[in-house]
Image (cartoon, rainbow, N blue to C red):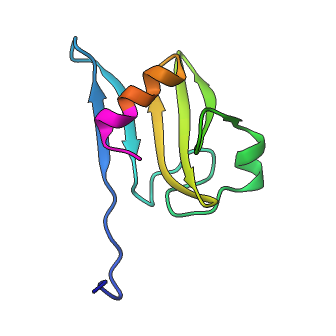
Amino acid sequence: MPRRGRKRAGRVTAVLTAAGMVSTVASTAGGHRALRVSPGSRLTERARARTKPFGRGLRSRRAGGGRRIVLGVRKGRVRWVAVTTARSRAGFRAERRRAGLR
């Protein structure tokens, strides 16, 4: 039975490279925003216009310095936000799996 009146806490996950450097940081916490959207909110027209498709259910935008902002979207809602240094979809897909994001 679902709990009423209590919002579930979000989760922040960091993915490390073999050298121990952080390559991806992802969050499902509602207070963590990127491109003026946060997990749980609808993907706004503004965010959609400023991002490009990066695979099924993914929207991304370059953030400078070799970083990329990625939004995980399902049924029109943002499920998680992430910042990554992955250069390709395949590379990010592997990091997404390691972070436990769907």
Q: Can you name the residue that lies furthest to the top here?
A: 19
Q: Is residue 99 above or below residue 46?
A: above
Whether the magenta-drawn stretch holds residue 85 is answered as no
User: Relative to residue 16, is residue 36 drawn left or right?
Assistant: right
Relative placement, left or right, of 88 versus 31 is right
Q: Viewer-proximal residue, 9 or 54?
A: 54
Left or right of residue 37: residue 47: right
Q: Quadrant of residue 52?
A: top right
Q: Which residues are magenta?
A: 96-102
Nearer to us in this view, 46 or 56: 56
**Is residue 85 left or right of 45 when viewed as pictured?**
left
Q: Quadrant of the N terminus?
A: bottom left
Does the magenta portion include 97? Answer: yes
* Residue 85 visible in the snapshot: no
> What is the x, y in percent for residue 69?
55, 34
Position of 73 relative to 94 (above/below): below
Residue 80 image position (x, y, % from top left): 46, 50
Q: Residue at x 60, y 34 (%)?
A: 55
Give the camera-side residue of 95 and 83: 95
Residue 37 percent coordinates (x, y): 60, 54
Query: Residue 58, can we see it?
Result: yes
Report the number of discs: 0
Task: Residue 81 in the image: state x and y as whole percent.
Answer: 48, 45
- The residue sitting at 55% across, 43% down in the picture is 71
Q: Residue at x 57, y 63 (%)?
A: 41
